């Protein structure tokens, strides 16, 4: 019985853990409808975004703000509407994009 209790104690917190920034979080947040990691779709590729802001210390906050509040005239004529995601997810996605 004790191994079963230990297993529950280890795995139960994982059920309630926030999603980690990754392709999975980007897909869950519907980012992949307009973006791709490697190639331009309606919006720029995540790798293109990462390259543009490489070394910019303000990039993480700026990207999260763009996700939460929308942005236009930054990557062309098609604006990005404000996304309905949690601020913590926007921050995690920004971090992830900048690692690509």
Image (cartoon, rainbow, N blue to C red):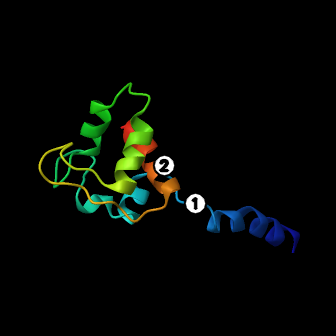
Q: Residues within 10 Å of mark 2 (few under 14, many from 20)?
A: some
Task: Say which residue label 1 marks.
Answer: 18
Quadrant holding the N terminus: bottom right
Q: Residue at x 41, y 48 (%)?
A: 64
Numbered tag placed on residue 92 in the rendering: 2
Name the quadrant containing residue 59. Answer: top left
The answer to whether any part of residue 99 appears in the image is no
Q: Is any part of residue 57 visible from this angle? A: yes
Query: Which of 65/10 is in front?
Result: 65
At 42% across and 32% down in the image, what residue appears?
Answer: 58
Circle 1 sits in a helix, a strand or a loop, which is it? loop
Residue lying at the far bottom of the rendered structure? 1
Q: Which of the numbered marks, if any, corresponds to residue 27?
A: none
Give residue 23's quadrant in the image.
bottom left
Q: Answer with left or right where residue 38 lies relative to residue 19.
A: left
The residue under the point 76% across, 69% down is: 8
Separation of marks 1 and 2 at Cα, in angstroms: 10 Å
> Is 14 placed left or right of 85 in the picture?
right
Q: Earlier in the sequence, mark 1 or mark 2?
A: 1
Find residue 44 and report its horizontal and vertical position in percent.
Answer: 21, 46
Q: Can you name the residue that lies furthest to the right here?
A: 2
């Amino acid at each position: 019985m004790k191994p079963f209790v230990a297993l529950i104690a280890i795995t139960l917190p994982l059920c309630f853990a926030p999603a980690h920034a990754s392709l999975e979080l980007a897909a869950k947040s519907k980012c992949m409808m307009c973006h791709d990691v490697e190639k331009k779709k309606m919006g720029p590729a995540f790798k293109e975004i990462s390259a543009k802001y490489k070394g910019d210390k303000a990039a993480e906050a700026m990207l999260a703000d763009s996700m939460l509040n929308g942005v236009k005239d930054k990557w062309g004529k098609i604006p990005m509407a404000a996304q309905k995601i949690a601020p913590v997810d926007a921050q995690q996605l920004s971090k992830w994009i900048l690692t690509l």
